[in-house]
Amino acid sequence: MSYRIPSPPPSLEELAKRQQNVITASQLRARGVPARVVTGHCRRGGPWQRLLPRVYLLQSGEPTPEQRMWAALLYAAQNGREEGRREGAVITGTAALALYGFAAVPRLPAVTGVDVLVPRQRRLKDAGEVRIRRTERELVASSVHGLACAPVARAVADALREWTAEGAALPVRAVLREAVERPDIRCTVRELVAELTESGLAADLRVRAALDELLAAERDAVLERLGALLDEWLLPVPLTGPELRMRGGTYIAVPDLYWPTVGVAVEVDSELRCVSEGEAAWVRGGQHRMEYLGVRLVHVGGVRLAAEPEAVGAELREAFRLGGTDVVELLVTER
């Protein structure tokens, strides 16, 4: 049996360096600094200053933007936590996007308020420029310059909610586009859709319009890759987005791709066509109707297409070879 010898907690100097000279009262107390010394050091003209309740800056002068972020985070997460652990709070909203380096939001020095997410059961009040935001979901943190920030999708949703509440102009398109296009962030359209739907922001017309643009661009990119794959596998060119109806005019569906001669349809990332559950139900209904009428349906996901193009190509060729089963005669209208 092996034993791990616990490492000693960092010294005050080490912790101050790690947290950019921002320290909580509990951290000072744990390192033997009496309360009277803290009070004395924070008097007018003293070497320290109080930034927030039980949060101190071990220097005089104006705090830097990063020190303000540290103070907000430590204020929300302290409660006696040792060694600066911050799992009880994450920075979100505009402040988080500024830390991520979003060009569509003000730079960090211009951020005047800091939204911090904490578990709903925490008893904590707003203080100074810190606004406490509670959540029932488990906190997930990404380290940005050593600070715990909400994942990009959640930070975007909270920033949009913040701007809406303040009546500010919403750079919705720019923020959403930057979130999914920056390679260093790795936020997917699916994550944004899920977060904005969860927060209720997807119902906002401006947000919905920007989401629709992102979804369409994502699907177009997948369809373009799929078209190249069909060429590689020497499959005939299918119809793109045709409208299928019964002879009597009853609407059936609009598949992404369709080979009418063999009764085979392809649906690409169906969830990227849907923001609301009503839209998802509408798409699923069309898929069920196609299968009921004998059309062979092949589902292709963009992630799998990128990772396993050979497998997807073989699946499509096999589906084309087999064709549909007793397909009901359908009217096909190219759009």
Image (cartoon, grey):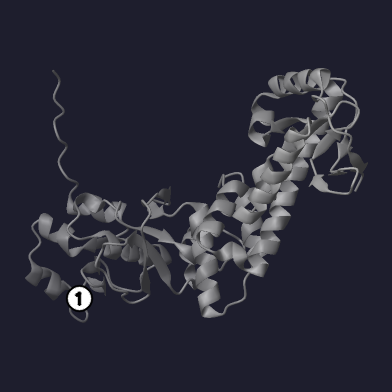
Residue 232 lies left or right of residue 65; in this view the side is: right
Looking at the picture, how far across and down is residue 38, in whole percent? 14, 69
Tell me what residue is drawn at x 51 percent, y 57 percent.
Answer: 198
The residue under the point 66% across, 62% down is 208
Quadrant in which the N terminus appears: top left
Residue type, mark 1 in image: Gly
Note whether 271 is above or below 98 in the view shown. Answer: above
Q: Nearer the viewer, residue 242 or 246?
A: 246
Farthest front residue in view: 248
Report whether 105 appears left or right of 88: right
Q: Is residue 134 visible?
A: yes
Q: Which residue position is annotated with label 1?
A: 46
Quadrant position of residue 224: top right
Residue 296 falls in which quadrant of the image?
top right
In this view, 224 is above or below 205: above
Residue 265, image x and y in percent?
79, 33
**Left or right: 185 in relation to 221:** left
The image quadrant that residue 68 belongs to is bottom left
At which x and y percent is residue 330? Answer: 88, 38
